[in-house]
Image (tube, rainbow, N blue to C red):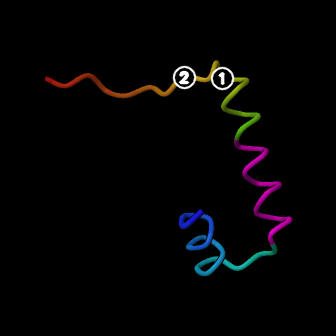
Amino acid sequence: MKISQDIRREHGGSRTEIEEGMAQNSREFAEAGNRVSLPLAD
């Protein structure tokens, strides 16, 4: 929740706009296979 509050404070936007953006990011993540790609350590 703190992250969401920080984003609102820094970038403005209504709660609805932020929730719609987060839902869109969630859909894109699911379409990409729900995986986080991290570089391998050397």
Q: Which residues are magenta?
A: 15-25
For disc 1, the marked residue is 32
Q: Is residue 20 above or below residue 29?
A: below
> Would residue 36 be counted in the magenta stretch?
no
Residue furthest right in the image: 16
Residue furthest front in the image: 1
* SS state under label 1: loop
The residue positioned 77% from the left and 75% from the top of the image is: 13
What's under tag 2, amino acid-wise?
Arg
Q: CA distance from mark 1 to mark 2?
A: 7 Å
* Rendered location of residue 2, percent (x, y): 54, 67
What's under tag 1, amino acid-wise?
Ala
Q: Using the rendered view, name the quadrant where residue 14 is placed.
A: bottom right
Position of 38 with respect to 23 (left or right) is left
The residue positioned 76% from the left and 54% from the top of the image is: 21
Q: Using the rendered view, name the quadrant where residue 20 is placed.
A: bottom right
The residue positioned 58% from the left and 79% from the top of the image is: 10
Q: Is residue 20 above or below residue 36?
A: below
* Rendered location of residue 30, percent (x, y): 70, 26
> Would residue 24 be counted in the magenta stretch?
yes
The residue positioned 79% from the left and 57% from the top of the image is: 19
Position of 16 with respect to 7 (left or right) is right
Residue furthest top in the image: 33
For disc 2, the marked residue is 35
Whether the residues at callouts 1 and 2 have beta carbons within 8 Å, the answer is yes
Position of 40 with respect to 3 (left or right) is left
* Rendered location of residue 7, percent (x, y): 60, 70
The image quadrant where one finds the C terminus is top left
* SS state under label 2: loop
What's the mark number on residue 41? none
